[in-house]
Amino acid sequence: MKAFGICMQSLLAVRQQPSHRSEMTNQLLFGELMYVLDKLDSWFLIVSVHDNYEGWVDLRQVALLPEEEFISLNRSPAACLTSLHGRALCTGRPDIHLLLGSKLPWASENKLVISGETYTIDGEIGQPDEQLNAEQLVGDARRFLGSPYLWGGRSLFGIDCSGLVQVVFGLQGINLPRDSSMQVRQGHSVDFISEAMAGDLAFFDNQEEEIVHVGMMVDSRTVIHASGEVRIDGIDHYGIYNAQSQSYSHKLRIIKRLS
């Protein structure tokens, strides 16, 4: 099967298996594109375009696109919603609630056209600068503070550690892989934690030396990450120190710089 789709909802759950009881491994935000690989009953097997991540979605929640329109949208400037919340308004249709990081392809003067229908965006639209802005990265990450941890989540209402990093970098037009084990392959290493800068990514491993967690450095002594909730904790060359439990929660493996 060869087809193309777009997420036209606030959030779209991506599952490991074609069942609503299956584990949610990812979410797509409004405006994110997907390749449709296969169909099984009421489910599509898809790969998200921005990170090449595979999973199953309810076909009733996918808007299919002609190939020509899909290619055009995929080549459009990387605009996205930069306000915490917004709406996509279209005459004759219910409002679509938008979340921070939603993609807005070909948005011009707060309007975008998808499948022949014009949507007016009630919210702030931003386009990334040519250079990565570390201060803005940390500022955007701080906007998620207090958001609950949710495996596979990518929104203010629930987000995981790699989802936080992916969405924040996405606001600056940088498409990172979905999982921390893949994100660690990006950028170049920072040799000493004392040399870490705002926007650097800190990766943490388990006893099997597998990368299982990621956070963003606020400065050389603190890190923002999703663990229980999005929070800021102290960090040193051993790892993340949780002041509440007075213990280390994650063991530091490596720090990477993407700029």
Image (spheres, rainbow, N blue to C red):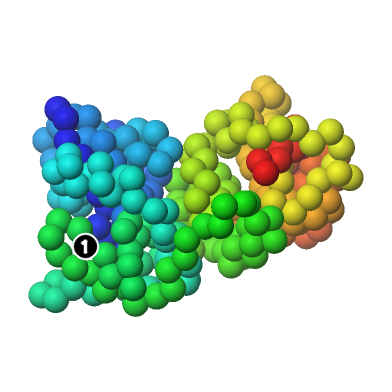
Q: Name the residue at 57% across, 52% down.
A: 130
Q: Name the residue at 71% across, 32% down.
A: 188
| Drawn side of residue 217 relative to residue 6, left or right | right
Tell me the element at label 1: strand
- Mark 1 residue crowding within 10 angstroms, few (<14) / some (14–19) / many (20+): some
| Drawn side of residue 205 relative to residue 36, left or right | right
**Residue of label 1:** 113
The residue lying toward the viewer, choosing from 228 and 94, is 94
| Image quarter in which the C terminus is found | top right
Spot occupied by residue 120 in the image (x, y as percentages of width and height): 26, 74
Spot occupied by residue 108 in the image (x, y as percentages of width and height): 33, 67
> Compared with residue 149, is residue 25 higher up or lower down, i.e. above or below?
above
Extreme-top residue of the structure: 208
The quarter of the displayed image where residue 228 is located = bottom right
The quarter of the displayed image where residue 23 is located = top left
Q: Can residue 12 be seen in the rendering of this structure?
A: no
| Image quarter in which the N terminus is found | top left
Q: Name the residue at 34% across, 77% down.
A: 122
The quarter of the displayed image where residue 47 is located = top left
